[in-house]
Image: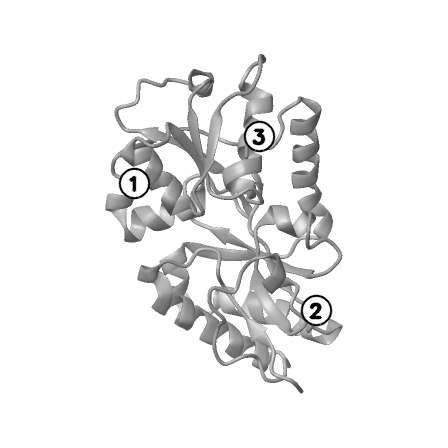
Amino acid sequence: MAERVASLPMYEIAETAAATDAWWTGIAGHFAAAGLTDPPAGLARPGKGTAFWLRPDLLFSQTCGYPFVASLAGKVSLLATPCYDAPGCDGPDYCSLVIVREDAPRGSFRDLRGSRCAVNSMDSWSGHHALRLLIALEGGQGGPFCRATATGSHAASIAAVAGGQADFAAIDCVTHATLVRHRPPAVAATRVLCRTPAMPGLPLIAGRAATARDIAAMREGLAAAAADPELADARKAFGIVGMHFPPESEYSRLSAAVEKAEAAGVASLL
């Protein structure tokens, strides 16, 4: 069998790289115990983006929810949704935290109208489309809500707000909690103004290289890894507290939310 690839790219920062490797080693061991043949020994890095997730040799990865329902729909398989212990999470659901500078005189989301927004990327649910939904629900009417600039990452969006290059940003609440836990100076000059509506969290997926038997073994292995006491430290590094196994239809909530924003006239911010 040709070698297959795996990645866990979505919540890794330099401070958690060792924990990512330990988590993967544990997951791979449970995959093998469940009958998966020769799981990859190591992870591909950075291992993300539509082109990577559509690689013919991809076995396992984690993606953002918006690409999952848009560019990856019908081309990869849903395995599970991790549950995180982070402010803004509720079981497998999560939200984005709208942040402003600590000293910003903003009391509500509508106070941000006409200001500058930092957006990590156009295909991000948490940094872009979640904001579109919030604008549709809470922004009021009357022309474009904000002026947006792409930053390339949530960490860069936080830095732009902290440094005064942007007035606000929507940050994945798990990313925010990870930075609070491992890199507190990064968020020290900001505060949370409000939250976006809750949506299904970032899915773990099987790629084109996975057979039906592989998928069943990986789901069994993920359930075992989420309960393995020997992996407690690795899970704690990311705040993982469980594993949810939803039907793919659960992610249709994201598609419906984008449709709601478009129906309200809130176009892409970038």
Closest to the observer, 184 or 56: 56
Which residue does the image show at 27% across and 28% down from the upper left? 102
Q: Residues within 10 Å of mark 1 (few under 14, many from 20)?
A: many
Percent coordinates x, y for residue 65 in the rendering: 60, 48
Percent coordinates x, y for residue 228 in the rendering: 46, 70
Which residue does the image show at 50% across and 64% down from the upper left? 8
The Cα atoms of the two marked residues, 2 and 1, are separated by 38 Å
Q: Which residue is mark 2?
A: 208
User: What is the quadrant of residue 151 in the picture?
Assistant: top left
Which residue does the image show at 26% across and 24% down from the upper left? 103
The Cα atoms of the two marked residues, 1 and 3, are separated by 23 Å
Classify the position of the N terminus by image quarter. bottom right
Pointer 2 with pointer 3, Cβ within 8 A: no
List the single residue furthest toward the bottom: 1
**Residue 188 horizontal side relative to residue 154, left or right:** left
Q: Which residue is mark 1?
A: 187
Numbered circle sitting on residue 132: 3
Dot 1 or dot 3: first in sequence order is 3
Classify the position of the C terminus by image quarter. top right
**Residue 210 horizontal side relative to residue 140, left or right:** right
User: What is the quadrant of residue 160 in the picture?
Assistant: top left
Percent coordinates x, y for residue 267 in the rendering: 63, 28
Amino acid at the residue labelled 2: Arg
